[in-house]
Amino acid sequence: MRQMRLYYPIPMVSRTLKVSTSGFYAWLGRPPSERAKEEMRLEVEIKAAHSRTRHTYGAERLQRELAGQGVIVGICRIKRIRRKLGLRCKQKRKFRATTDSNHSLPVAENMLKQQFKV
């Protein structure tokens, strides 16, 4: 509703969502709840830990990292906050050689007589 009020009148939005207009304004003026405050604090903590670990830790390792800092938080909550913030860990890939020049397979004959020398 907060975003839609820029485009539509509040009474129309509140009728559509079946919410009273006065209830919306009461909610708008309310201070953030304890959980919302803790959520904002955790967002900052998780962002900092994500940067500190060079974007390589997943949710489980991040939970242990935060516990080492004295922040106790559940794994599902970490996953939800990371998804909300768009934080993803880097996937390290194993180096794999894609060309094998030293093989004993037959090489096709140059039927077109092309010269590949520069």
Image (cartoon, rainbow, N blue to C red):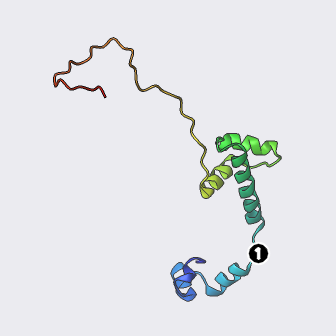
Q: Are there few (<14), some (14-19), or many (20+) residues within 10 Å of tag 1?
A: few
Residue at image position (52%, 86%) is 12
Q: Is residue 79 above or below residue 112?
A: below
- The percent coordinates of residue 66 (x first, y second) are 76, 46
**Foreground pick, 49 / 5:** 49
The kind of secondary structure element at disc 1 is loop
**Foreground pick, 80 / 118:** 118
Q: Identify the residue position indicated by label 1 in the image.
A: 31
- Figure quadrant of the C terminus: top left
Q: Is residue 40 left or right of residue 100?
A: right
Residue at image position (36%, 14%) is 103
Could you tell me if residue 50 is visible in this image? Answer: yes
Q: Amino acid at mark 1?
A: Pro
Q: Is residue 62 left or right of residue 101?
A: right
**Foreground pick, 10 / 110:** 110
Residue at image position (74%, 78%) is 30
- Figure quadrant of the N terminus: bottom right
Could you tell me if residue 18 is visible in this image? Answer: no
Q: Is residue 97 left or right of residue 43?
A: left
Q: Quadrant of residue 24?
A: bottom right
- The percent coordinates of residue 74 (x first, y second) are 71, 48
- The percent coordinates of residue 41 (x first, y second) are 76, 59
Residue at image position (40%, 20%) is 100
**Foreground pick, 31 / 109:** 109
